Amino acid sequence: MPTLSVGALLDATGGTLLAGDPRTPVTSYAIDSRKISRGGAFFALAGERTDGHAFVGDAGRHEAAVAIVARRPEGNGPLPAALIQVDDVAAALARSGAYARQKLRARFIALTGSAGKTTTKEFIAKALGASLKVHRNIGNLNNELGVPLTLLSCPDDAEAAVIEMGMRGPGEIAFLARLVDPDIALVTNVRPVHLEFFESVDGIAAAKGELFAVLRENATAVVNLDDARVRVQAARHAGPRVTFGQTAGADVVLLSVSDRFLPGAALTLRIGGRTRTLSLRVGGAHVALDALAAAATVVACGVPIEPALDALTFMEPAPGRGRISELPGPMTLVDDTYNSNPEALASVLRTLGASSPAGRRVLVMGDMLELGANAAAFHREAGEQIAASGIGLLVTVGPLSRQAAEVARRAGIEVAAFDDASGAAGTIASLVRPGDLVVVKGSRGIRLEQVVDALVTRRGEAA
């Protein structure tokens, strides 16, 4: 990561030096005092549950180089070597991230979208990694705190940085995009998610489209031509673009998709007159579309395309992002527990219906959160889709998913309904059979990873 100094952070934040030498080097950055290392900077954020100022002493015991604070620490305990006082620590973190970004020579790729953005980020990083040294967000560090930390941790010698951006309301994407100042920008898609915070899907589209709106004129927009709302938002950028989709005139054309969990999705695409078929290590047409978006981003970057496409076929999904495991029995488990929304669930159901396991198709469905006033209706509609999808067993978790359970049960589907993930985890191993294909999907707040852990622990993971 770039080695800044206390003085550089002082300049970036516009703060006041309370103590310490401005020449002191700073080699790492954290908002959690437990993650501070010697020579690091600690941003003492005041949160809803804890105030980082109570942990400045911990940062001192870890030999932090500097703490950025809103008030002078109390007490006589150990302190970091330097203290910078600012009016707003979160704003100071953002300014520090933007400062670090301007010191870096890497090509910056920013992406957002309603679904698949983390998997797309991983695909892009894997593809570009065939030719370049790549930096990216770790985990879900994609918000107003995570993005500046990602910028601050970017190595000096990185040649590309792939920055995922999340949001919960209007203005957030524009704020993050100005910090990142991307050379290439991608909006994967627009879906009915976070409706608790927006009046309509068009409102979500406008918020995602802020990425295009603030893009530098000479930067490149990567545009999904198959998403009408993305096309509309892309018009907010007048500069160069690379397009992808099923449209014959796209720069990266999707010719076909093999929608399946076993042995994994595949897609055939055409780039510049050349056709390639890619077999992926993760299932579902929705993931194939993420790989398509990544391929278009590679084209926008101008790196060699063939090794990048080869690399896409080796991308392994992170836990909760569609990871496929073969368990003794045998049984196939798809861990898609990180998040869920109506369209993502519908896509999973289509893929389940197109898969041919030796046993049953089993769906463990958790509540889809943040859907606003129509949440119950979305879950009833999911029940109708489940009834028509060839599911052999439906396991629901949470009060909203009981709406889907009732509809599916009336259609003759075998159903087991649970109030919470711990209840489902305690029973799931007795519900599944050898040969079953089990897909576990729900919103993050439902904690369906407990169900995945129960299956893996009780049956033993073989692969």
Image (cartoon, rainbow, N blue to C red):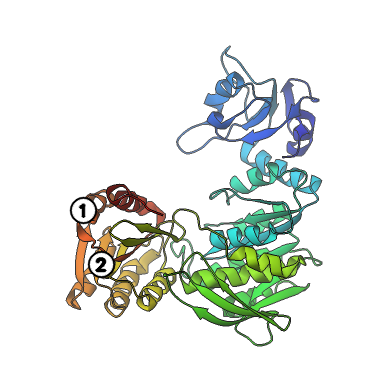
Furthest residue to the bottom? 248
Residue 321 x %, y %: 47, 58
Residue indicated by mark 1: 427
At horizontal 69% and vertical 86% (from top left) the residue drawn is: 249
**As drawn, 238 above or below 210:** below
Residue 11 x %, y %: 79, 35
Residue indicated by mark 2: 394
Furthest residue to the top? 76
At horizontal 65% and vertical 21% (from top left) the residue drawn is: 80
- For mark 1, give the secondary structure: helix
Cβ atoms under marks 2 and 1 closer than 8 Å: no
Side of 412 where 40 appears, left or right = right
Asked if residue 37 shows in the view, the reply is yes
At horizontal 47% and vertical 39% (from top left) the residue drawn is: 48
For badge 2, the amino acid type reads: Leu
- For mark 2, give the secondary structure: strand
**As drawn, 219 above or below 271:** above
Give the image quarter of residue 224. bottom right
Residue 430 x %, y %: 19, 56
Residue 39 x %, y %: 68, 26
At horizontal 54% and vertical 61% (from top left) the residue drawn is: 119
Asked if residue 212 shows in the view, the reply is no
For badge 1, the amino acid type reads: Thr
- How packed mark 1 is, by other alpha carbons closer than 10 Å (few <14, some 14-19, many 20 or more), is some
Side of 375 where 222 appears, left or right = right
Q: Quadrant of the N terminus?
A: top right
Spatial separation of the CA atoms under disc 2 and disc 1: 13 Å
- How packed mark 2 is, by other alpha carbons closer than 10 Å (few <14, some 14-19, many 20 or more), is many
Side of 344 where 297 appears, left or right = right
Give the image quarter of residue 206. bottom right
Q: Nearer the viewer, residue 69 or 184?
A: 184
